[in-house]
Amino acid sequence: MSTEKIIRNQAKQSLKGNWVAIISAVLFILTAIIGIALIGSLVLNFFETYDYETGETIKENRIAEIIVNFALIVSALFLSPLYSGLYRMFINTARYGKTDLSDFFYFFAEKQLYLKALIINFVSGVLVIGLGYGLNPYFYVNMATGMDINNITEFSFGTLCLTGSYIAGIVIKIFLYMIFAHYPILYLSVNEHYPLSHFTFKMYSFALKNFGKTFKLLFTFTGWIALCFFVVPAFYVLPYLGVSMANSAKWLFGINEYRG
């Protein structure tokens, strides 16, 4: 039996009795995201920042649009420790076979924990989004050719390059997320009292060293992830994937600490 299969089987066992709590946390986050987006949309409509006939922002109201979007980003950032709490639920399920919603709200319990989670999430977000944008080959191919992946009508060398760059962009974003977000956020729930340096450069080095193992496990979920297109399977796939990735990290963290 492969290592990935063992990790996934262990995750399934750990999830027994924890499905409801984790799915509830996922629904809470989705509701918060939808709520923030809806409020933003209503405010933007109130200020009439968008011309639906031309499909462009009205120049006179562009400042209002910037302010509203900035407020939405700040709101999401302040709520981001909930995301850290979801990761805590994943790792505690993998470690102890038990979690509840107190783990989800854990980083709101103390000011220092909240600030640490906030800083880690902010740094992770800036690096993943910033580098994901700058290193995305699709962006440059799109700029050079003027072609859009959503408007491909015929096969040509240009469309081949566009499609290849689009796929490469997805792989790069996964790589960046695993290096700069996945492991630092998980490690916060394992050693929350460590200084911030442990969750940045030291963890980036650890993530790079173990990226092959991480990607290999993630790749085994390709079929499951594809099923999320139908929405309902996502409520099974997300907890299963999250706890499996946390279970893998649990063993890697242990090996890493044992080796010093």
Image (spheres, rainbow, N blue to C red):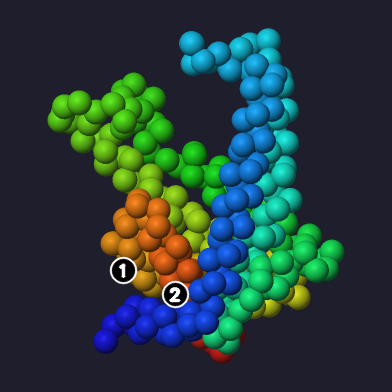
Residue at point 61%, 12% (across, down)? 58
Q: Furthest-bottom residue in view? A: 258
* CA neighbours of label 2 inside 10 A, class few (<14), some (14 to 19), many (20+): many
Q: In whole angstroms, how far apart are the C-alphas of marks 2 and 1?
A: 11 Å
- Viewed as shown, does residue 81 lie left or right of 169? right
Task: Tell me the quadrant of the picture where the C terminus can be found.
Answer: bottom right
Residue at point 64%, 50% (across, down)? 32
* CA neighbours of label 1 inside 10 A, class few (<14), some (14 to 19), many (20+): some
Instruction: Please provide percent x and percent y for residue 169.
Output: 38, 44
- Viewed as shown, does residue 136 lie left or right of 31? left
Q: As displayed, is residue 163 above or below residue 143?
A: below
- Residue under label 2: 244
**Quarter residue 194 falls in:** bottom right
Instruction: Please provide percent x and percent y for residue 8.
Output: 38, 78
Among numbered discs 2 and 1, the one appearing first in the sequence = 1
Instruction: Please provide percent x and percent y for residue 113.
Output: 78, 67
Q: Amino acid at mark 1?
A: Thr
Residue at point 39%, 31% (across, down)? 140
Task: Tell me the quadrant of the picture where the N terminus can be found.
Answer: bottom left
Residue at point 70%, 19% (across, down)? 47
Secondary structure at badge 1 equals loop
Q: Is residue 249 visible?
A: no
Q: Is residue 142 visible?
A: yes
Q: How many marks?
A: 2
**Quarter residue 182 falls in:** bottom right
Residue toward you, 46 or 6: 46
Q: Amino acid at mark 2?
A: Ser
Instruction: Please provide percent x and percent y for residue 46.
Output: 69, 21
- Residue under label 1: 220
